[in-house]
Amino acid sequence: MSKALEGVRILDMTHVQSGPTCTQLLAWFGADVIKIERPGVGDATRGQLQDIPNVDSLYFTMLNANKRGMTLNTKDDDGKAIFTKLIKHCDVMVENFAPGALDRMGFTWERIQEINPRMIYASVKGFGPGPFQDCKVYENVAQCTGGSASTTGFDDGPPLVTGAQIGDSGTGLHLLAGILAALYQRTNTGRGQRVECAMQDSVLNLCRVKLRDQQRLAHGVLKEYPQYPNGVFGDTAPRSGNASGGGQPGWIVKCKGWETDANAYIYIITQAAVWGKLAEAIGHPELVDDPEWATPDARLQRLEEVFDLIEQWTMTKTKFEAMDILNPLNVPCGPILSMKEISEDMSLRDTGTVVEVDHPERGKYLTVGNPIKLSDSPSDVQRSPLLGEHTDDVLREIGFSDTEIGEARASGAV
């Protein structure tokens, strides 16, 4: 079966996480992704957080599946000549260097267009034009400047970053959408274009409901927030703990075993349509028609009491027992799954969301597979490349003879 992006060649100049997330997805969709790394050094994540000495880290292997690996010194004149040929032979170049890095190497957007007018040049940046545009950005900086941290956590605590990599991987996903759109447009125009994603912008896009709430706040208190009815609202969208953020109140409550298990919890949403069934399930049928509990507005006045009652019941059940009881009643709920539980969930293996991969130096390890499923383009996850593993193959494909390859190696260009 053919792949969606078969025949598309990607020049992958990315490193660490935001860019490699994007190019790994392109590879899973069938593109030929050529990852360029510095000779003898490679992507910094090869050596970061190593759990096995002198073996590529999981940080690297889990972000660079299905790619071919090539080493290239783009600061060397011979290396620049090879880089120029690669630009001619590729459809898309993806990079997440510090601002201006490729320009300083002599490869401005104008120069790239001269070399290959069909080239799509895609970049991850920390910020768009503005006061911070030259600043370096990492995951947590993006979460803080994109609005996530200020709206995460409890009202009586500090801002918090989330464990989801919404700055790095989130921006990689946004960049992927831009690249696919540019590839599609090129089929009509024949021209490449610039695609840019700022990490701040991507985080804000994922925090749009908080920008919504900032504007609603000008017209009164936010009734779905835990500060209502007894708390104080200031002039900015507050932190909302575990509140659901929508019109249906939700919270995380303890389950059986919470004293020793940090993840013995379940999230329950008290959706208005199923309140009666929920009240009966937790052993309080008298609340179904009680005017002080029966309507959403009445419950908003006493949400702490609502979830206290629910928690008294959930503490007698494991999170999976509670799920088994509530799910058939159409109560929106979900167990708090630990990374250990997720890694052992066979249903996720069956769908290819979690995949076991064999690596020649590391052995078997788990990685996240393609979360986007296409019926006519299956994604098979292959291991990440060793440093420079495919250098000679790629050079031959772009027209280098074995003698020229030897000369490039001797000069340190690759």
Image (cartoon, helix red, strand yellow):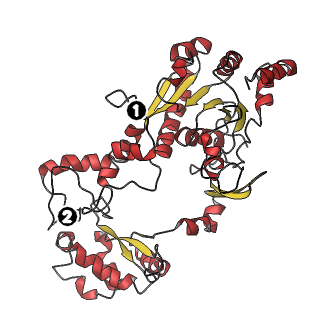
Picture coordinates of residue 118 (x, y %)?
59, 19
**What residue sits right under mark 1 in the picture?**
135
On the rendered image, what quadrant is the N terminus found in?
top right
The disc labelled 1 sits on which kind of residue?
Answer: Cys
Q: Nearer the viewer, residue 360 or 332?
A: 360
SS assignment at label 1: loop
Inspect this view and state whether residue 146 appears.
no
Q: Nearer the viewer, residue 399 or 407?
A: 407
Q: Nearer the viewer, residue 41 or 192?
A: 41
Picture coordinates of residue 372 (x, y %)?
57, 49
Q: Nearer the viewer, residue 125 or 217?
A: 125
The disc labelled 2 sits on which kind of residue?
Answer: Gln
Residue 227 image label: 2
On the rendered image, what quadrant is the C terminus found in?
top right
Q: Quadrant of residue 187?
A: top right
Task: Write the residue at 65% across / 40% down.
Answer: 27
Above or below, comparing residue 407 to residue 46 in the picture = above
Task: Write the residue at 46% across / 72% down.
Answer: 263
Picture coordinates of residue 367 (x, y %)?
64, 55
Picture coordinates of residue 398 (x, y %)?
76, 21
* Label 1 packing within 10 angstroms: few (<14), some (14-19), many (20+): few
SS assignment at label 2: loop
